[in-house]
């Protein structure tokens, strides 16, 4: 059986062996359905890069087959790539109400709303896209309106869970569709793609409700104003903050662009209930008794420009935090954000605030949106797939998820830990992973999508470490004599005024290098001269400073 | 009472409102004693900087008064600045055996050993330095041979704890000098400086011994080779690894420069007991049965060049990790190192290893070297100081430590949370904090100490984000006509071959700018021309790319 005969193929363009940038593809013959279109943030090594999105070369090469982009939920690692990818390939988008609301906002900002093809779905929807029929089921996560996706193909059923936990006492009573999942599993699942974020964590993630209890308690205890910060997209948590404010007779002020934005979308579509008259403006908040006011704001990750960070360093004009006010971080710092969060906490203590901060498992002010090991096992048990592909996670998470799948009875040889671009082909009910398609990172820098490559990044790194030394010299075309220079310009290497001696010596070194070359041969080549100057200065500078600035010799013949 | 009359002064040159770079000063009249001389690592914003050390302007200005540098223990945040600071000010150094051994290594590397004045002390030592008499007491920490320091001055007794925990069942039976501490406190302590690293954590830090139990258990369970990685300086933990190897009949291979270095110093001074014939070389390790070998290596923080990281990506030639081998991280990832540790763990799983990783509180493979809240309260209770200055920590830790001091009876007004450079003056048994001396960060870059300032760092940041565009044009001195150029050179901005159109337009823009200026006035100033070119290109490039590269116009008159 050759791979060409395979009708059903499953692969990732982003999201495996990494966190973020999720994009999965289900292809049956000439029909392609894409799941999610996320972005991720660059690490420090990608200097100046704003965002990373999936490389969609494969989709562009097969664009006549692409039927739809289905989006499981509205987090950035699932929708963040949409405005960029849509410029490259305009796919029809299918998503639930809240998810679509958030996508719409992004498209509007990027002037893409008019040309986009948006379709609202819910867990009851049923869609036919060529030979693939799609169904959905509701899951719980740290944002409402999440969907798992079922692909009914002639070869068999494929299930993609999206992000999920099993919250059996969910806020707003959005229960997980367990019976539906059971029925899907009962009817036979050929392949399951399930998320692995918390595959390393034993147990069962607590219900979002326990956060509500802790928030209410803190609101009751607070003597003066309460400031509470969380992820704007966690609408259920926002609801619990609103409920706590109401129970403690506080009015609520919203601060931060994304907080105001998400609240307005969520209210509009009925995902958030705010009692009339509860929301107030900054001016009113300042005029009211301090124990009658709560502030719900962005900045739980210490983002320097977010509301809480600016409140903490007293650069937020409209409102201020006074001694005795309570500040709650209703979010655990994500690895990498600790330093920024700590700085904000320090600043808040300096203002005299009572600060509730640290890990949510200690403060009770945060629970994960992802299911732990017992929930992953529950999903595997409900779906009882023949083949299993763990997704969403770095290798160790996919690996642990494989162990969980084995533990609940999936055959070891039927589990595929894939890399982005690895294709799992299934035909005649047999899966094999032999071929690869193009996959990788597309870097976004400013307006540029994919135009910053390795050469540019290597130069940025070099410049960042030790700066640049530009050496300019003008030579006569006729006799090779120096007409102007050498002039030495330093940027990011040394401060010129304080390093005159060093720069004088570099100057001398350039003169000597030119003289030597001119004595040696009347046919001096500029490329050789440039190379010699670079070499001589590089050696001298390293010996003197142990630094290696980029050296840019500019030799001009006039 | 004017501050000039104060005889006793206490201040920090590093270590408060920050983690690392510890340096404290006790001055009585004309005698200055310095405690510790640490370094800290720069954050991402300090591009190209290797290390941060304290600004010792004050000590240099008062060098005739500086009697000694006393070092509490051998961690980098207490000794890392010594080779740099000693070049600026050659103080006699007093430290315990192991601490001195580690300092000696640093001085040797920097060619400073001959001129340095090293004095070995222990917890029984007594030194007189002018009007100040020094005594010491033994503490427990994650490195052996730690000392607390007592300063007997005519004004009263000052105690500096160094880093400490109370390990009541210490490895190697190096018990904390509790009775001595009690006696110091009983005789009256005017001021206590106590470390605050774990002031946010409730409870009592577990004994290092529990790590030994877990290591032994893991060694027993391991089917094949065991690789274990921890901080080289944690000699007690190394001892427990050696003990576990012996109990399970394994020979031990040491990998990593600092591991080999610390083991050899610790063996030499009798801090580490290794049974004869236990240590083996890589060649022997490869020839032995896999279940008879253990490997103790560096790299527990995922440092890219350390032994474990290289083992994990199979770039360590002499030894390799095979499927079924066990790898233990005997250290919790320090915030900021998670990504590197995770990469290493992923690579190890890919090799088929059983990996024991994650937080030490879950794995049992790590305990903190710093005392938690109950231990900090115990120290405060033993010393019962009149004045208290929390040290070693960011503001929130110092703040929490103040609350602990209040809880055990120190008067609130007698607690000073100081910044680096804030001076606490005590005279006639009364303390006040009113004046400041110079303090701050000295940046080390290559051989340069303190020569990289804000201008250079700002340029590096600019270059790192968006690179540089150099525009070179030669004009005739006589008629202002263009002789060569404009030539555009891009580094770290765009890759020239892929951005020809953009660069062509920039070229045209320069020509237009020059022409316009020449038409407008025959007396064209080069500074104005440069400014105009910069402005025109900057605007155009930002509009086209949303990036702001550094623009360096070079206009040459020939």
Image (cartoon, coloured by chain):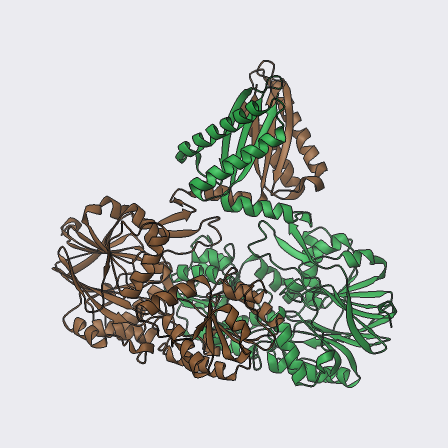
Chain colours: A brown, B green
Is any atom of residue A299 visible in this view?
yes
Q: Quadrant of the C terminus of chain B?
A: top right
Front in this rendered view, residue B177 or A164: A164
Q: Is residue B59 above or below residue A350?
A: above
Residue at 57 percent of width and 68 percent of height: B276
Front in this rendered view, residue B546 or A140: B546
Is any atom of residue B246 visible in this view?
no
Q: How far across and down, in percent of the image, does residue A373 sit?
A: 33, 74
Q: How far across and down, in percent of the image, does residue B126 sit?
A: 81, 73
- The quadrant in which residue B6 appears is bottom right
- The quadrant in which residue B155 appears is bottom right
Residue at 40 percent of width and 79 percent of height: A243
Q: How far across and down, in percent of the image, does residue A193 sit?
A: 26, 64
Q: Is residue B425 above or below residue A85?
A: below
Front in this rendered view, residue A335 or A246: A246
A86 sits left or right of B162 in the view: left
Q: How far across and down, in percent of the image, does residue B316 sit?
A: 46, 54
Q: Quadrant of the N terminus of chain B?
A: bottom right
User: So how many labels did they put on this image?
Assistant: 0
Q: Is residue B370 above or below residue B79?
A: below
Q: Is residue A549 above or below residue A532?
A: below
Front in this rendered view, residue B75 or B33: B33
């Amino acid at each position: 059986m050759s791979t060409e005969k395979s009708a059903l193929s499953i692969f990732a363009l982003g999201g495996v062996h990494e966190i973020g940038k999720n994009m999965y593809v289900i292809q049956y013959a000439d029909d392609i359905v894409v799941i999610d279109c996320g972005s991720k943030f660059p690490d420090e090594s990608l200097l100046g890069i704003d965002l990373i999105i999936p490389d969609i070369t494969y989709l562009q090469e097969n664009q006549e087959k692409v039927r739809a982009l289905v989006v499981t939920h509205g987090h950035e690692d699932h929708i963040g790539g949409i405005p960029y990818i849509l410029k490259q390939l305009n796919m029809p988008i299918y998503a639930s109400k809240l998810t679509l609301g958030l996508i719409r906002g992004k498209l509007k900002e990027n002037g893409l709303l008019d040309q986009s093809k948006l379709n609202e779905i819910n867990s009851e929807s049923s869609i036919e896209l060529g030979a693939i029929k799609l169904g959905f089921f509701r899951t719980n996560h740290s944002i409402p309106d999440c969907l798992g996706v079922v692909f009914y193909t002639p070869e068999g059923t494929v299930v993609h869970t999206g992000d999920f936990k099993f919250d059996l006492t969910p806020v707003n009573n959005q229960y997980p569709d367990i019976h539906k999942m059971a029925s899907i599993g009962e009817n036979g699942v050929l392949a399951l793609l399930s998320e692995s974020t918390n595959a390393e964590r034993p147990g069962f993630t607590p219900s979002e409700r326990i956060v509500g209890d802790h928030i209410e308690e803190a609101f009751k205890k607070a003597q003066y104003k309460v400031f509470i910060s969380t992820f704007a997209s966690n609408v259920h948590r926002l609801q619990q903050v609103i409920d706590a404010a109401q129970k403690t007779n506080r009015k609520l002020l919203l601060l931060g662009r994304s907080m105001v934005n998400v609240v307005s979308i969520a209210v509009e579509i009925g995902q958030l209930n705010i009692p009339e008259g509860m929301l107030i403006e900054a001016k009113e908040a300042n005029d009211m008794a301090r124990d009658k006011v709560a502030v719900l704001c962005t900045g739980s990750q210490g983002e320097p420009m977010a509301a809480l960070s600016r409140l903490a360093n007293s650069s937020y004009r409209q409102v201020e935090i006074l001694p005795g006010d309570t500040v709650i971080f209703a979010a655990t710092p994500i690895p990498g954000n600790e330093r920024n969060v700590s700085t904000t906490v320090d600043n808040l203590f300096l203002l005299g605030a009572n600060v509730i901060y640290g890990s949510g498992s200690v403060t009770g002010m945060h629970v994960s949106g992802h299911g732990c090991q017992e929930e992953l096992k529950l999903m595997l048990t409900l779906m009882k797939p023949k083949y299993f592909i763990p997704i969403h996670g770095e290798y160790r998470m996919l690996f642990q998820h494989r162990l969980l799948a084995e533990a609940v009875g999936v055959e070891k040889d039927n589990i595929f830990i894939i890399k982005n671009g690895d294709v799992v082909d299934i035909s005649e009910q047999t899966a094999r992973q032999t071929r690869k398609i193009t996959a990788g990172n597309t870097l976004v820098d400013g307006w540029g999508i994919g135009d910053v490559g390795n050469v540019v990044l290597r130069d940025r790194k070099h410049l960042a470490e030790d700066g640049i030394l530009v050496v300019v010299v003008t030579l006569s075309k006729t006799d090779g004599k120096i007409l102007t220079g050498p002039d030495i310009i330093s940027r990011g290497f040394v401060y010129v005024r304080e390093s005159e001696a060093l720069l004088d010596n570099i100057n001398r070194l350039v003169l000597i290098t030119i003289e030597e070359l001119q004595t040696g041969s009347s046919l001096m080549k500029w490329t050789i001269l440039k190379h010699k100057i670079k070499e001589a200065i590089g050696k001298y500078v390293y010996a003197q400073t142990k630094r290696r600035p980029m050296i840019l010799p500019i030799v001009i013949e006039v």
